[in-house]
Image (spheres, rainbow, N blue to C red):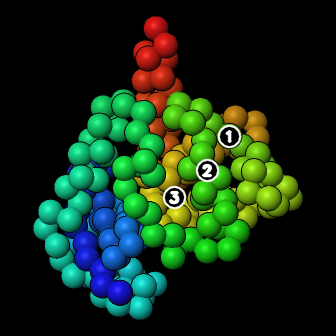
Amino acid sequence: MTYRYDFVPTPFGDALAVFSDDGIVRFDLSEAEDPTVPWLLESVALSLGAMPEPDAGAADELAHLVAEYFEGLPIDFREHVAFDWRLATGFSGDALRAIADIPFGETMSYGEVAIRAGRPRAARAVGTACRLTPFSVIVPVHRVVRSDGSVGQYGAYPERKRYLIDLEREAARAMVD
């Protein structure tokens, strides 16, 4: 298996996009100012068992989709990009697949996702799957909220989660009007 990487611009900075022969295996909005920092690629290499090679242009299609998403278009990335789920196994993978089915502009509680993923008492495990997702933004973990409707955390950036929820809700409202 070979791995390659490229970068995708977002309003939050460049995201690291790592591809395997089977599809996107990781989309990482790093907390680092510079996503090319060695520790980020080393972390990815450890999880994959191989160092991804740089491949300028590998993420061009994904970058176009991400740009459209941030313009408010209801993009379901699974319809356009092949996903390689190897870093999302077990219940985490089940939870992330259930999250990917949450419609654009809508939210669901951690408990509701747990039910959809087949483990009704695993709301905390859903939170862990969200926190550790290898697919930031492109699997919409930001659509998962607390049972009281508050947004909760999004890594160290709850304001990003609020931004994404608001972006989608406003765009969905505009599509109806």
| Residue 108: mark | 1
Q: Which residue is mark 3?
A: 155
Identity of the residue furthest to the left in this view:
56
Q: Is residue 28 visible?
A: no
Q: Is label 2 or label 1 in front? A: 2
Which is more toward the observer, 102 or 109?
A: 102
To which quarter of the image does residue 94 belong? bottom right
Decide: few, some or many residues near mark 1? Use Cα within 10 Å; few <14, some 14-19, many ≥20: some
Q: CA distance from mark 2 to mark 3?
A: 17 Å
- Please give the name of the residue rendered at 46% of the width and 8% of the height, measured from the top-left corner: 177
Disc 1 residue type?
Met
Q: CA distance from mark 2 to mark 1?
A: 8 Å
Decide: few, some or many residues near mark 2? Use Cα within 10 Å; few <14, some 14-19, many ≥20: many
Disc 3 residue type?
Gly
Q: In the visual, does 11 lie left or right of 124?
A: left
Of helix, strand and loop, which one carries label 1? strand
| Residue 99: mark | 2
Q: Is residue 147 above or below residue 131?
A: above
Identity of the residue furthest to the top in this view:
177
